Amino acid sequence: MSQSNLATSTPVPVTSKGVNKVLVLAGILLLISLSAWGFQLKNGLIVTDMSNSFSWGLYIATFAFFVGIAAGGLIVSSSVYLFNLENLKPFTKIASLSAFACTLGAGAMILPDMGRVDRVFYMILHPNISSPLVWDMIVIASYLVVTFLSVYMQLLPDWKRDGRGFLNGWTKKCSFEEVEEFSKRWSRRVAIIGLPFAVLIHTVTALLFATQASRSYWNTASLPPDFIAAAVASGTALVMVISILAVGKDRFNQYQDAFRTLATIVAGALVVHFFLISVDLIIHAWWGGAEGQELFYILFDRYGLLYGIEILLPAFTMIFFFTSKGKSSRNALLFGSLLLFIGIFAHRLMLMYPSFNMIPLNMHVSGVDIGNWAYPVATGEFQEGISSFTSFWPYKPTGVELALSLLPYGIVMFVVSFVMKLYPLLPSGLNKD
Amino acid sequence: MRLGMVIDLDKCIGCRTCAVVCKSHNAQPPGTWWNRVFTPGSDYHQNAVGEEGNLLMTFLPVSCQMCDNAPCEKVCPVGATFTDDKGVVLIDFERCIGCRYCIAACPYNVRQFNWEDPKKVKERAGYKEDYQYGYPADVRDEDGRLVYTPNRPVGTVEKCTFCFQYTSQGKNPACVDACPSKARIFGDLDDPNSEVSRLIRERQAFRLKEELGTNPKVYYLPASKPNR
Amino acid sequence: MEKTKVKPKFGLSRRQFLKGTAATGVLVGTMGAMNLTPKAVADEVEQPPELKKVRTTCSPNCTGACGVEAIVENDELKAIIQAADYEDEVYNPRGCLKGLSMMNLVYGPDRLKTPLIQKGQPGVDDLEESTWDEALDYTAQRLKEIAEKYGPESIGVAFQVGGTSYVHKGALSRLATLAGWNIHHAYDQNGDLPMFWPMTFGVQSEELEPSEWLNSTYMAVFGSNILATRLPDAHFLVDSRNQGAKVVVFDPNFSPTAAKADEYVPINSSSDAVVALGICKVIVEEGLHDESFLKTFTDFPLLVRSDNGKRLKAEEVAGLTPPPVPDYRQSFVAYNGSFLAVDPEKLDLPENIWLEGEVEVPLKDGSKVKAKTVFQLLKESLGQYTPEMVAEESGMNPEDLVRIAREMGTAETLHIVYGASNYQWYHGDLKGRALALINVLTGNIGRPGAGISTYAGQYRIRLNVGEWWVPEGRPQNWLPFLYLLNGPTENMKAKHPEHGIKALIFGWGNPFDQHNMANILRERVQSGELEFVAVMDFQMTTSCHFSHVVLPGVTWFEKTDLVATPVHPYLQLQQPAIPPVYDCKPELWIIRELAKRWDPEFEQYFFPGFEANEAAEEAIKLMLRTGGPAVEGITLEMLKEGPVRLKSEVPGHKQIPFYEQVQFKRPFPPQSLPAKLEATAQFVKSGQIEFYKDEDVFLELGEELPVHKPPFEDSEYALNPEAREKYKFSYITRNGIYRVHSTHSNNIWMNELQEGKPHVWLNPEDAREKGIKTGDPVEVYNDRGKVFCYAIVDPGIGRHVAIFEQGWWSRYLRGTSYNALTYPFIKPTHEVYFVPGMWAPNTAWNECLCDVRKVGDQE
Ligand SMILES: Nc1nc2c(c(=O)[nH]1)N[C@H]1C(S)=C(S)[C@@H](COP(=O)(O)OP(=O)(O)OC[C@H]3O[C@@H](n4cnc5c(=O)[nH]c(N)nc54)[C@H](O)[C@@H]3O)O[C@H]1N2
Ligand SMILES: Nc1nc2c(c(=O)[nH]1)N[C@H]1C(S)=C(S)[C@@H](COP(=O)(O)OP(=O)(O)OC[C@H]3O[C@@H](n4cnc5c(=O)[nH]c(N)nc54)[C@H](O)[C@@H]3O)O[C@H]1N2
Ligand code: SF4
Ligand code: SF4
Ligand code: SF4
Ligand code: SF4
Ligand code: SF4
Ligand SMILES: [Mo]
């Protein structure tokens, strides 16, 4: 994204070529993903590589990824208010907007995963309150509202000044100061109530998995805190990245302080993340047995590469962001964040592999030396000459899945760049030189 | 009344007739099996397990365990999976949104998803044009919920219903009537005099993954041979 | 969402989801494939639909003959379930996974739709659709041409064994008889004829009905995989064991049956005779044999001349006058201090008759000859089968052998099951004679729960069918199938047609996969040596691809027929549940149409003017009327009500072989239908159970008494001495639970259950040596041919055994054939026992050597 165009003297919408390019890119992504969705609707989920034994795949991983990075927004804006991290203040609008967009993206990603998307409104008509999915829907919807309000509140004064805006008719009667005052007060309130929601969406999304006693890899109380830690890390990193890009190369130094703070948050959150992961692994290893062996085989051997990515890239970022070198340069921060995103995405995918490839119905066969025999599962797919049963599904997302998973990326890019194009997101002061 | 099933693994000869009759009477398309029978310890059914001089072969049929504490039901966001007044866990084909959360939740891997329109699968398999096998009519429960339909809507989940179309009429499930070894016994677990209750009491019945607390209503009798 | 009230219309053949108005929902526009189903309101609970249920009989070639109920809606078969209506509760429910999934064949992709004619090269070009008239006219014309050129006996007819279809198969026999064609009997073609039966007991084959297993206290199973091949009866094995019977399984391979047994005894392939004889030696040595039984019912007291090895005839002995006997009998001689002319029609030798010993016999010509009793000779012969020798040959532990021999010797009721796979070896007759000896020595014959049984395919005819099968008692031509493959032999008793077989008409069989040298048959069709082949089947089998004309028949759900099979002694009616699918026709109709085109005079033999199912009913009435004591008093109307137990002389009409002989002291053999008694009794002229065979061939081969001969010596190695070094694996083609031979080879669900692939099972050690892992594509091969399949490494498989589950259509084997490896060996002792339409040289599928290699690895 080009940044120099932000340097107008009055806070006017950004109308840069960069933003336009992003918009075009977003359009392309949306087009690709929506056509993939159309194709999937026509043929059924058979076009994916999921099966009865591997019932969730890239879609849910992407969903979880976007839920994670959606955290950043409110964490940044709330920190401003809660921890008085004033240096982050310039980025609260961007942060809120990215949170809003990511939540929207996450919500959209879940739709194509539904076999009957035409019936999703049954979740509202006939909600089953014991289902973590229902709680997730509620907290995500609430978070969407909160992030929306956060953006809205913060934009009110600008809109008032420019005499434009959205759902802001009521401000006509008020003075600019009144609006500004209102905006301040409410932004703060929203940020404060937003924080628990940010924590909740991760907790509940984690609970979606962690409640499942039949899947030992998920079924751990450390999953929710770990989700939060990973979310704080990746969400903060996302705000940082957008901000770095928004302020541009030239003014990077001006905000270096803020970026340092953000990087420290990222690294700190990663410490917690790794702590929780290791505790879990230690428990599995200590308990040992056939199931433990199976898990370690899947993590370190069968999916060793993916797991390596999950562990090593964020680990590098963590260490890197603790060093002053890593924290200080624009490229270092962008690079570290990129590695982190890849790592966290791998982490989300690795929610699926070890879990679905350790068939819950497994047993010890007494009398012979068999410790962990997995009862084969009917795949749900039929092809002549191919077994209809499996005890291991080497899931590889299909082209359609890959294409369709571009949907949230398209949405986030579209929303962020579109809003940026319409309204100034960096405070006017920032735009001066 | 709590309907339950006992499967006698000593009598079970691993013939898979129950799996096939389930498939046919419940119109499961190719690739879908509500009921499976495998040889624990072996990748291929009816292969020996162990090594020379120490060989073993037992058979284990698995369909929906009809959990009293059913995770599939608890996770279902729209209440499409529910337990009826006889304790049978059912799926409403008109309610299911196809989220497949229940598949992830079921510890027994018995849930099956219609990844594709079942009609298309049958067509691809090459059956006579428009031919449909299985119990040919829709079946609704007392609340009008569609719990069986010969051609399931694409994108919904399905599993053993304890043959609702038959058991709601007081008949036996297909697999129980079809088992040539009479290894499957069906009845009321609440009735202490029923054959299922008696067998559970007398024969050291066990349940699969008991430790998960799902409380299945399918019981197994051990495959032990008489000791002489 | 709009709520529409929908009343289900059960009249629709196809139930569709009613399309609701998709007023709500996301992305409605793109949802063409997704219909919203309006929910019926609560008070409108649906009534069960009107379903037609038809009681009929599943009847492929497996012996099951299970009574099933077809669930039919709008003339379409929707589901099948066991009828479970046998009077004898223990037989309910009878059925298996194949029978209950028949819709896969009735409506499956390979179902024949119309008659087909080959206008190009069989096996290469596609057959073309034709009308019935075209196909039938063409067939009749080609047959007439061939008959004119080579005589009608050059037309061969094959149809699977009769028990599953007395009407339609009978019709083909009827036509073949009228037209003077040659008939290839299915029983020996299948390898299902256990030749020890005629040799020892003078019968075709016998078995206890499975409910009798509950009366056994000891079941010894020699190579019969009951859990796979007797699926509906397998529970009796477990039930019997749980009631206290001891079950022991002898098999080179750990089978599901072995898994259910009390004891599994792994033995080397085809070493059963040595095991049995080792057991007999212990029994005799320890005096566990039943002397009085032996004196009454066996040839053991008979004297055998030491000079020529022949049994001493009463007419040869000085001073003895043989009692008057029919032609098919012979009076032999026994001794109890004086010589007795034994009356073969009476089983009444005195208690003091000698079982053992040697005497000098004065002959009529004044000379003297030494003679020993059969039992004496037997004891001497058994001497070699010491536990150590048995251990050496069979791999069985000597202590186990002795223990098991004692257990058997003292068992109250011993039942031995001798599997088809086990007698489908070159020396299968010897193994059977040795196994039967255990039962006979211990008097375990002709009592509830006791006996030896061979549960093979549906062979024996249970009622007199002559009136329908053999019109006016006309002569028939029978040519054993092995001669078709092998050409005539020196010792053959059957008449070989001068020009050989030039045309083949068959039904209910798939010889181009199932019969040995299937590849040779294919070559003969393609070279024109076999000039014309016509097949009746309901699906497009490999054989259809190699035929000139394909005449689409129907399944057992589409016609009327009569069924009664040996293992399951009920007479049952097959009733049409649905009309013929597509343009298929009941075989009786096809045969009648062919008959009238061959000779217009013949039509009258096939109930002209009657629709096919009515004509079938007429044939049934005829057979019930003339069927003899087994069907006495049974009417068509009774059969329409349900299955009726066949009559027998055993209390409760039970099926216990030789019950009459043992309980009522009737001479052996009982009659084996369809032959007349004299035809079979001539082979046990003594009227007793015969263990001593003195025909020249037996003497030449040293097989006058049951002995052990190792496999391959007289077959594979004799054919090609190099095979000894080259091929170390024995190729065992067993049956799988997913097929009835090649029937259900293409059943979609069955294939889903077995990875959709044919497999070969190997011992882990052998596999390791060959670098083969489970799942590897491999070739099993020998000099004669090869078969393509996938390996399964199974610790239950014996060393140097390659097991292939037979019955796969060639198309699943990349065009290869598993029967390209087998060879049509003819054992000379079998040729002696030729009775047209009954006994003939038996095929030995498992007498076959091979090797295995990974595909890609060349030799
Ligand atoms: N499912 C099914 N059932 C069938 C049939 C079918 O096609 N499918 N066909 C029917 C017909 S027609 C027949 S003939 C019967 C055949 O019935 P079976 O004789 O039971 O058939 P197989 O499966 O060939 O062989 C059974 C066992 O024989 C063992 N065996 C092989 N050689 C020897 C040997 O030399 N000694 C010993 N002790 N064991 C040996 C094999 O290891 C195998 O375990 O099955 C009938 N039932
Ligand atoms: N290598 C090897 N070969 C073997 C064996 C072995 O163990 N090893 N086993 C042998 C044995 S024991 C047997 S019994 C034979 C069996 O061999 P086959 O007699 O050839 O038996 P199937 O393969 O079942 O073929 C029966 C055919 O008849 C058709 N059919 C069935 N019912 C009807 C009907 O009502 N009408 C018409 N028109 N057609 C019908 C079926 O579609 C099927 O194609 O195979 C033998 N071949
Ligand atoms: S039908 Fe009966 S014997 Fe056969 S696998 Fe099923 S439970 Fe076991
Ligand atoms: S076995 Fe699975 S599908 Fe059945 S009730 Fe239990 S959790 Fe639900
Ligand atoms: S897939 Fe259907 S039944 Fe399963 S949880 Fe989702 S809505 Fe409920
Ligand atoms: S009860 Fe019915 S649905 Fe359930 S496994 Fe048995 S046959 Fe299938
Ligand atoms: S295939 Fe044989 S055993 Fe199975 S149902 Fe039919 S007749 Fe019975
Ligand atoms: Mo057979």
Image: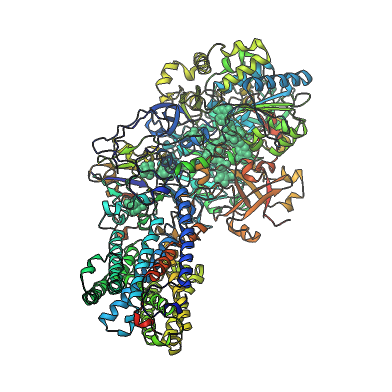
Q: Where does residue B193 sit, x and y in percent of width and height?
A: 23, 42
Q: Nearer the viewer, residue C611 or C173?
A: C611
Q: Where does residue B208 sit, x and y in percent of width and height?
A: 35, 55
Q: Nearer the viewer, residue C630 or C587?
A: C587
The answer to whether residue C754 is left or right of residue B157 is right
Q: Point out the image quarter for the N terminus of chain C.
A: top left
* Label total for image: 0
The answer to whether residue C146 is left or right of residue C127 is right
Q: Where does residue C436 sit, x and y in percent of width and height?
A: 56, 37
Q: Would you say residue C280 is visible in this rendering?
A: no
Q: Quadrant of ligand 3?
A: top left
Q: Where does residue C154 sit, x and y in percent of width and height?
A: 74, 23
Q: Point out the image quarter for the C terminus of chain C.
A: bottom right
The answer to whether residue C691 is left or right of residue C715 is left
Q: Nearer the viewer, residue C687 or C672?
A: C672
Looking at the image, residue A214 lies above or below residue C225: below
Quadrant housing residue C684:
top right
Q: Residue furthest bottom?
A: A324
Looking at the image, residue C691 lies above or below residue B158: above
Q: Nearer the viewer, residue A241 or C662?
A: A241
